[in-house]
Amino acid sequence: MINKHILKTLSVWLFVIICCFSINTVIAQKATSPVTVSVTTPRRGTFVSAKDYTGHLQPNAEMKVFANVSGEIVSLEAKVGQSVAKGDALAQSSSKETALAVIRAESALSRAESQLTTTEASAQARVESQLAVAQEALMAAQGTLVETKSLAEIRIRNQLTQAETAHQAALATIERSKINAEQALERAKAELAKNKLEFDRNKTLHEKQHISDSNFEAVEQRFKVSQTRYEEAVVTAEQFKEGAIHPSVEKAKADLAVAQKVVESRGWEREIASAESQVTQAQASLNTAQKLVEAKSWEHEINIASTAVTQANEQLKLARQQLSDATIKSPIDGIVATQHLNIGDHALLASSPTGRPVFTVVAVDVLKAVWNIPIGDARRINNGDLVLISTDAGIRNIVGTVTFISPTVSDNTVLVQATVPNSKNSLKPGTAITISIKTGERKNVQLLPLRSVVNIQNGSGTIFVVEGNVARTKQVNVGGVYTGEIEVTSQLARVTSVIVDNQHRLQDGTRVSVAQD
């Protein structure tokens, strides 16, 4: 009996508890406000599958800027981080050699222009003057030839007659000189004998002191003079002995021999031949001068002078360009990334073994995305394909164009590069990036926003749908994910209202209110 009573009592209390719980649940549900949610409906579209890879950004171009001519850095026109355009001055170097080369080139051009002016003014007149001179020379040569033919033999025979006369005159002169020398010797001999007698007599008187010293010295002086004259007369007479050689006679004799040989060899014929040769040469010179006039050779001279001016101009342009090259300029549009030299440093050419760049400039208006893909994925991509690029900083959906796929494999991967526009310079070289590459495409598939599906595991997930004014959970099968959408393979009615936010506040049966757009 007691057990039955206890059991009955427990049953009553259990009933009361259940009733109270039910009443409290109803009251709680009536008291809770509905959760405001946003909804969407499934859509049909094309599903693009993709695969992500990691990489980084590089400058599309990086130029190390060297000096074009060696010289000391005298000024810097740019600094690190500065944006520069192609051709902007970055630095200035000093080069005395190039400045001197410009001065020399200017001087050479001035000389060439002066020569051209002179040639244009006088070349024709000079060539025509040469023709006139050649004509006069021919006439003179022809006159000489006529004269030579007429007078050469007579002149040469006259020269022989003159040589014979000169030889006879020389012999006669020598004979007269011989007679004069002999007569002079006799006079000198007689005078010497006379003065000797007087000297001997006065010597005796002087020794006896009958005459003064001065008188004796005068006599002695006359005696010595007569001795000298006698000796000179002897020498002169010796010159005219038989067989003595007399230069004037020998010269006249030699001239006579030459004149005789010229007559014997008919020397006038050689003179006529020489005159004829002179006429031939003069005629050749005249022909040459006539051809130069007919060919207007002065035009060729003017062309040569004009060419010299052109060449001098080119040399001046080159020298000025080399002087301009002393200004170190940016070869590309970009940003100065590094400064390697300072004012006072000596800049060398890129070809120098010890040369260092002055600056490094990088082009950042277009960057280069660089990444590696497994060799098995390489078939999925081609040059010209578009890829989507995102950065860790939150910049999304940057479109790049594949420009390079390495033909070689390293560590079972292939290097890929793509150009990335960067007109606003929002992207920085060195930034880590994610590259999405399209791997497939399926049309007319059912898609929902990725955020509308929760608890995705093993190809299935949970969605909340609105039925009436409450949320209901529903399990669905899912496929791939692409650009914020997920494929739902479970069939849903097109009008199904799928909740896309606040799922963490929902459970099956939670009252909801749909937010109005």
Image (tube, rainbow, N blue to C red):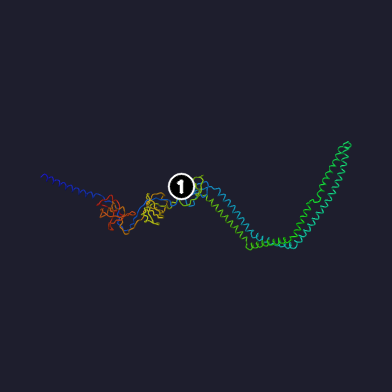
Q: In this view, which residue lies farthest toward the top? A: 209
Between residues 432 and 21, which one lies in front from this camera angle? 432
Residue 218 in picture, x, y percent from top left: 86, 40
The total of numbered circles placed on residues is 1
Would you say residue 338 is visible in this rendering?
yes
Q: Amino acid at mark 1?
A: Thr
Describe the element under mark 1 as helix, strand or loop.
strand
Q: In this view, which residue lies farthest toward the left? A: 1
Residue 89 in picture, x, y percent from top left: 50, 50
Residue 378 in picture, x, y percent from top left: 37, 55
Would you say residue 36 is visible in this rendering?
no
Quadrant including the C terminus = bottom left
Question: Would you say 1 lies left or right of 509 here?
Answer: left
Q: In this view, which residue lies farthest toward the front? A: 242
The structure residue drawn at horizontal position 46% and vertical position 47%, both measured from the top left corner, is 338
Quadrant including the N terminus = top left
| Residue 283 vertical position relative to residue 395 in the rendered view, above or below | below
Label 1 sits on residue: 338
Residue 317 in picture, x, y percent from top left: 55, 54
Mark 1: few, some, or many residues within 10 Å (few <14, many ≥20)?
some
Between residues 221 and 486, which one lies in front from this camera angle? 221
